[in-house]
């Protein structure tokens, strides 16, 4: 039985790879169970024994020089509770803008302008009738033809149409209609369509 001695370069290469694998596995187990690697500790701003100055605007959480455990600086947090931001109105994201003072709305305390008058009543709704013709015979009053959508009304002067509109006056080119619900009068011209 031969052990592969006829191809000596392959045996040497396999032995080197085996030794490298054993070394890397041993290093891996040693680093997991062994002493921890040295950690990088940030430099302290001052002596760890001296308390921080509450007027400084440093972080409220710091690290001591001997450990990586965070330290909460309660006095610094308490001093920042009473602070109130009073901005100047300047947008820090747009360079070169001037601060424009805000005007006080009319009617508010400190305003120099008089309060605006109250709004008036809304205008009455328009009369949506269309005057498209009239008929007159001798001896009879003149009748007009009014349309609202697809509905056609025939009316005399003084008559109420659609239980809402009263025909006040009929002339050859227009008709005066009154909305009896809103007391709104409107003159509707004769349309030729």
Image (cartoon, rainbow, N blue to C red):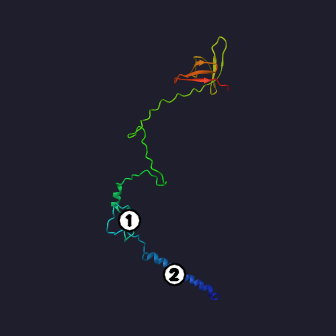
- At a point 46% along the width and 78% down the height, the residue shown is 30
- Residue at point 54%, 83% (across, down): 19
Reading the image, the residue beneath label 2 is 23
Q: Position of residue 130 (x, y in %)?
A: 62, 25
Secondary structure of residue under mark 1: strand
Q: In this orientation, does residue 1 appear?
A: no
Task: Please state which of residues 4 and 119 is positioned toward the viewer in this rendering.
Answer: 119
Q: Position of residue 192 (x, y in %)?
A: 67, 25
Comparing 133 with 25, the one in front is: 133
Q: For this view, does 130 lie left or right of residue 47?
A: right
Badge 1: residue crowd in 10 Å (few <14, some 14–19, many ≥20): some
Q: Quadrant of residue 52?
A: bottom left
Q: Find residue 62 and name its label.
A: 1
**Callout 2–callout 1 Cβ contact below 8 Å:** no
Estimate how packed mark 2 is, as few (under 14), some (14 to 19) or many (20 or more) residues with alpha carbons within 10 Å: few
Q: Which mark is residue 79?
A: none
Quadrant housing residue 173 = top right
Depth check, mark 2 against mark 1: the one in front is 1
């Amino acid at each position: 039985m031969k052990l592969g001695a006829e191809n000596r370069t392959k045996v040497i290469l396999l032995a080197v790879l085996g030794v490298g694998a054993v070394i890397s596995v041993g290093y891996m187990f040693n680093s997991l169970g062994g002493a921890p690697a040295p950690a990088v500790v940030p430099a302290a701003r001052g002596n760890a024994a001296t308390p921080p100055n509450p007027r400084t605007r440093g972080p409220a959480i710091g690290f001591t020089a001997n450990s990586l455990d965070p330290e909460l600086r309660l006095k610094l947090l308490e001093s920042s509770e009473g602070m109130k931001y009073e901005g100047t109105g300047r947008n820090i994201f747009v360079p070169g803008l001037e601060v424009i003072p805000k005007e006080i709305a009319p009617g508010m305390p400190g305003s120099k302008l008089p309060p605006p008058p109250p709004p008036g009543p809304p205008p009455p709704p328009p009369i949506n009738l269309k005057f498209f013709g009239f008929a007159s015979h001798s001896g009879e009053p003149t009748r007009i033809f009014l349309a609202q959508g697809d509905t056609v009304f025939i009316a005399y002067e003084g008559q109420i149409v659609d239980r809402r509109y009263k025909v006040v006056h009929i002339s050859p080119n227009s008709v005066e209609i009154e909305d009896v619900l809103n007391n709104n009068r409107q003159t509707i011209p004769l349309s030729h369509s």
